[in-house]
Image (cartoon, rainbow, N blue to C red):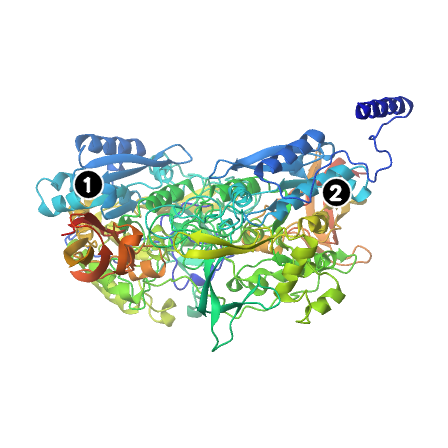
Amino acid sequence: MSNLQPLVALTGSDSSDLRPGARLLSWIPLVSMSFLLLLGAFAAPKHIVQDFSEYHSYAELTASLKALAKANPTLARLQSTGKTLEGRDIWMMEIGNSAGTPVGDRPALLVAANFEGNQVATSEIALSTISYLLENYSTNDAVKKSLDNQVFYFFPRVNPDGAEKMFAPVQTGTATNTSAYDDDNDGRTDEDAPEDLNKDGYITVMRVPDPSGLYMVDPTDARLMKKADPKKGESGTYSIYWEGIDNDGDGFYNEDAVGGTDINRNFQHEYPYYQRGAGLHMTSERETRAVLDFVIERRNIAMVLVYGPNDNLISAPTTKGELAEAKGIDLFSFADASLADAGKVGMFSAPTQRFFGGGGRGGGGETAPSGGGGRRPATTVAKADLDYFTTVSKKYIELTGIKNAPALSTPQGAFFQYSYFQYGVPSFSTPGWGLTAAPADTSKAAAGSKGKGGSGSEEKPSLDKKLAGWMDETGVDGFVAWTAFTHPTLGAVEIGGFKPYEAVNPPMTVVSEMASKNGEFAVYLSSLFADVNIAKTEVINHGGGVFRIKAEVENAGFLPTSSSHGVTSRSVKPTMVQLGIAPEALLSGSAKTSFFQAMDGSGTRQKFEWLIKGKKGDEIELKVVAQKGGTDTKKLRLQ
Amino acid sequence: MKRFFTLFLAWTGLALFAALSAPLATAQKASDPQHTLRLDFNRWHDYGELQQDMKTMADTWPEFLTYSSLGKSYGGRDITMVTINNPKTGPELEKPAMYIEANVHGNEIQGSEVSLYTIWYLMENYGKIDMITRLVDERVFYIIPTVNPDGRQFFMEGTGGGSRTGHVPVDDDNDGLYDEDPPNDLNGNGIRDQIRKYVPGEGNYRLNRDDPRMLEPVPTGEKGDWILLGSEGIDDDGDGRVDEDGPGGYDPNRNWAADWQPNYIQGGSMDYPFQLPTARAINDFLTSHPNIAGVQSYHNSGGMILRGPGAEWQGTYPRQDIAVYDELGKQGERMLPYYDYIIIWSGLYTVHGGFIDWTNDGLGILSFSNELWNGGQYFNSPKLQDQQKDSDSPIAGQKGSLYFDDYLEFGSQYAEWTEFDHPTYGKVELGGWSKLRGRIPPRFMNEELSHRNMAFTLYQADQMPKMQIHKPVVEKVADNVYRVRIDIENDRVAPTITERAAENNVVDPDLLVVSGRNVEVISAGWVANKFRPDATDLIDQKDLNRIMIRNGHPGRTTRTIEYLIRGSGDVTIAYESLKGGDVKTTASLK
């Protein structure tokens, strides 16, 4: 598979290429950098050298995490949740004061990052959030309250094998892990990886003069390429490929690189079956299962936050519960499109000589699908949950200063979608940083963001243009100028384009500037959890060993004890209220063990009442267990 | 003493016979047939006995059989397999293989006996029946009598209640405890009895006049003397509910990766596909054995030959795949009276994440699942079935069940109502059918069930693809340039790659590989009709020494490939197919 593209277009106009068969097309979820407007950041042109040496390699990340755990023994604990194919640990750092309520009984915020190997910045953001919590515990009341009463589970780097490619001599921009995978299904695995032909240390793209090509130089910026539109009298003059040679001589360039599976396309919700990069099947990867096994065991996880190339924070789900549309970098998706047919070579309807009967008869007994077929899984955020998503989105925008809607990928198989649609908790995703954008651009983008392909209206600036503009403005050296090269089979070509990591990872200064904002946001999220307690009890003696017990259970938190979809999906356990008596002692009233599905927050209460047989002086335990809202017990004395 | 003497005579006689005639078969020269190994197929094996019979067979026929384990169940039991392969006809992975499994639902036990019978029958008859000899020589068989050993053993040891699942603990009742309230056998009779209570004038059931063992609802407006209180059990965990959290609590046949759905859409699917250790072990085996071209997963009951898809929203199978399934399935209906060939979602019920959906869609294997045993087989003649329609007949409806038990199973499967002092319900009566009744055939009918189902599965195995490459026809067309035409044939019903497998790109393409010391392939193409001049459909692939045929070779089809080759000497042309076998031929360029 060509796992080079850091960003990908799943745009309206390209969506026709996304049918299941076209597996070689752009698939990596796009990043959201395009329209983000950071208040304050990059306000004036300044020259930033992107120095990735400040980014943590696996060894450095491991050392940092270990040092943090060592320096903060009561607050931070490091655990390996599994090993990757290449033997790296998938680290999980638990942050919470170990004194007080056992951490496993507290509601938790799971923060996970760097599912896509090329998104190393998200890992740095997670790390900076960990540091924020640890550094501010003793001085910041909100942080202290949160770490004393809640718990955080951090997966700073879910895909360390993929991320490690950033530190390799040749930068490929690999998003996937390194599981062997026959991307073009030709019976040979990982046999046609790209090569750094011009020896500049980057895998970029090749543009090749080709009268039957589909692409042309963008008239407004000669660095960029665009798809020629015959309806406007434009004709293509170039073909575009990933940089490299055709190692296996099949006519395709770099269609089967080492690896792999994109972990954020390998989860179970809206899984993109049999598509390139999605793995052999859902949850096929070690990294996927490490995360899943962890969250399934820790049902106290009440909310999920992913740092990654999907977004539902800058753009909250629509009133229909849908996510905003996707847009990616054209140059990468054009190169990807050159591989579209690699998985189709050899489909024959060859002439045959049949010798007896057989075949031919079709469809015996099979009725055509009528479009029904029982209950379908939800794919939009439930109405009753929408307000909570909107509230959190507003807060994120307020805290970070990011005002305009980013473009989004279609997050099929993404972890944050699994977390809401199957695990049943509120779940958010954000890149955690953004680009500045010219105001004119953003207003247009905002106006037409929902159209399918823009219905032929004036062209919106491509993400490529915004990205190039941002690089010009900030001095990020992220574009390799086109230079001539004599290719062994293609002849005269030019090699150039966006550098694979520079396109999706900001300078470290940006991560640092965002650290306290992301930290505050994580603390804010943890302050929203349901908080269930036994608010009031009363014991009435009716004489003759008959007692009446009354209790009120309250949710003092902001969120309900379960999201609405958590109830629908039966993935959040109902809150249990249990009276510690022998079943035969119960005379009337509530059941010994009662459950309620979901109770709103902000002080909402539920009443329970039991008539029981007992002896004066008996002590009875009343217990309430809310999977996402903590546990409370009260001892009641019969008198 | 007399007995010993007789034995002595017999043995001496045998020795004498042995001395005079070779080879010696067995003592009973006139028995028919003379079996090498006697096993029983008219009883139900527990897990240990299944293992013992598999081992015994592996020891008896070591040149063909291998006994191995694919992994362990949650309960620590091995998922054991017998591989049948004749190494003299080629390595295992180079021959198309038939995968046969059973008992994924712990209570659906008889498929295990069918599996044992299949191994035994193939081995007993190898070298005796030509068709069997050929099958064993051409094919490989992977046979796993039980893929849910924990569920099976729980069924065999217990009353049968709650045995469908495997035994990975699940908190069915959301109380934070796992599997803490299983079914109970209160009266120790080995049966999960029904509970009835005598409540004169206050009930909704009455006893049947002809046979007081039978309860019937009272007509509207009348009062009965009996109520039913569910199945035998107690509230083990004191939460006020009975038997609400037994072992496991999921469906091991919903944990597969095609159309897998979360629990609220598909109950019992677990948290993600292959979360169950048994499913994972089996999938690891399947994915590492791409020579598997046929799957049969035995279930019970109802008398069905099932194929996917499991859910309507998956749409229909591609046309050519349907044609192949139809041909095999309809053949099955003739071999298996009382069985219907049907599609899971339309004929049975909707299944998401089922095993044979995964093997068909995700692994590209033609897959069936037989639901063994149909209740019509109790009275299996047109005459008796006519009688059953007359409600006065002693074999009509519920009466028929009791009749069959009274006269053919001698009352062994029905427990009469007996008084019992229940801890919660007080004085009640317990009674009902044994776990063996209903979904499982009477023991004496199982050998027929085993044989007929095996025969269908062997038919499927025989119709898996089998590639043949015929003698090349070489013609010199210019200096050093030769036209080489070769017929490539698959004379079986199934294609080497199903249409669905090609759509999903889940099976490696078939390959046509040319090799020779001094040859250059100028062109290659498919010949439309080799008997008259016609166009050759040129193959537009970059590397003509290694032509990919992504959608494989259809069933019952011969294709003619034409090469233009420059060179001299010998050229070898090989057709390599994961599911159709590897074949090759050599042409001399002269």
Residue drawn 15% across and 58% down? A540
Task: For mark 2, name the chain.
Answer: B
Q: Amino acid at mark 2?
A: Leu
**Label 2 crowd bin: few (<14), some (14–19), many (20+), radius 10 Å:** some
Q: Secondary structure at mark 1?
A: loop
State whether residue A566 is above or below residue B132: below
The answer to whether residue A33 is seen in the rendering is no
A123 or B516, which lies in front?
Answer: A123
B223 or A54, which lies in front?
Answer: B223
B86 or A393, which lies in front?
Answer: B86
Q: Percent from the top left, x then y, of residue A110?
A: 27, 47
Residue drawn 30% across and 53% down? A584
**Label 1 crowd bin: few (<14), some (14–19), many (20+), radius 10 Å:** many
Q: Is residue A31 left or right of residue B200?
A: left
The answer to whether residue A582 is seen in the rendering is yes
Q: Which residue is mark 1?
A: A96
Q: Secondary structure at mark 2?
A: helix
Q: Percent from the top left, x then y, of residue A356?
A: 79, 58
Q: Which residue is mark 2?
A: B135
Residue drawn 59% across and 55% down? B500
State whether residue A142 is above or below residue A357: above
